[in-house]
Image (cartoon, rainbow, N blue to C red):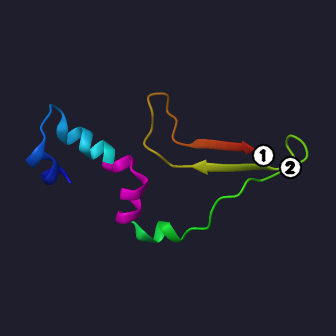
Amino acid sequence: MEDSMSRKFWWSQQRRDITNFCNHCTECLWLKNPHMAHRAPLRPIITGYPNSIVEMDIIGPLPETSRANRYILVLVDH
């Protein structure tokens, strides 16, 4: 995409802008990773009251932060 754009247009930070656009474009991401297009559509989870369904996930180990953190705890209350 960058080659075709630079033949017709030019601006400062052009490469950064094109890369950023392609990395966030849903259509571009699906073309790069076609099996994503076959995922089932997301559906809302309906509950009757708060805390009736709580999900938890731990991400890590990650590179240690300046405060010695290496994990991320994610909680979702549906």
On the image, the x and y values in percent for residue 73 come to 63, 42
**At label 2, which amino acid type do we have?**
Thr
Q: Is residue 7 above or below residue 67?
A: below
Which badge, 1 or 2, comes first in the chain's sequence?
2
Q: Residue furthest right?
A: 48
The residue beneath circle 1 is 78
Would residue 59 be counted in the magenta stretch?
no
Whether residue 21 sits left or right of residue 44 in the image: it is: left
Mark 2, residue position: 47
Q: Which of the 4 image quadrants contains residue 71?
A: top right
Residue 72: % across, % down: 57, 42
Residue 31: where, in percent of width, then height? Answer: 36, 65
- Residue occupying image coordinates x 62% and y 49%: 58
- Looking at the magenta stretch, what is its main secondary structure? helix
Residue 30 is marked as none
The three-letter code of the residue at mark 1 reads His
> Who is closer to the viewer here, 26 or 8?
8
Q: Secondary structure at mark 1?
A: loop
Asked if the residues shown at circle 1 and circle 2 are in contact, with their CB atoms under 8 angstroms apart, the answer is yes
Name the image quarter holding the N terminus.
Answer: bottom left
Which residue shows up at 45% across the image and 33% down it? 65
Q: Which residues are magenta?
A: 22-32
Q: Residues within 10 Å of mark 1 (few under 14, many from 20)?
A: some
Q: Is residue 51 left or right of residue 26?
A: right
Image quadrant of residue 43?
Answer: bottom right
Query: Was residue 28 drawn as part of the magenta stretch in this picture?
Result: yes
Point out the residue furthest to the top here.
Answer: 67
Q: CA distance from mark 1 to mark 2?
A: 7 Å
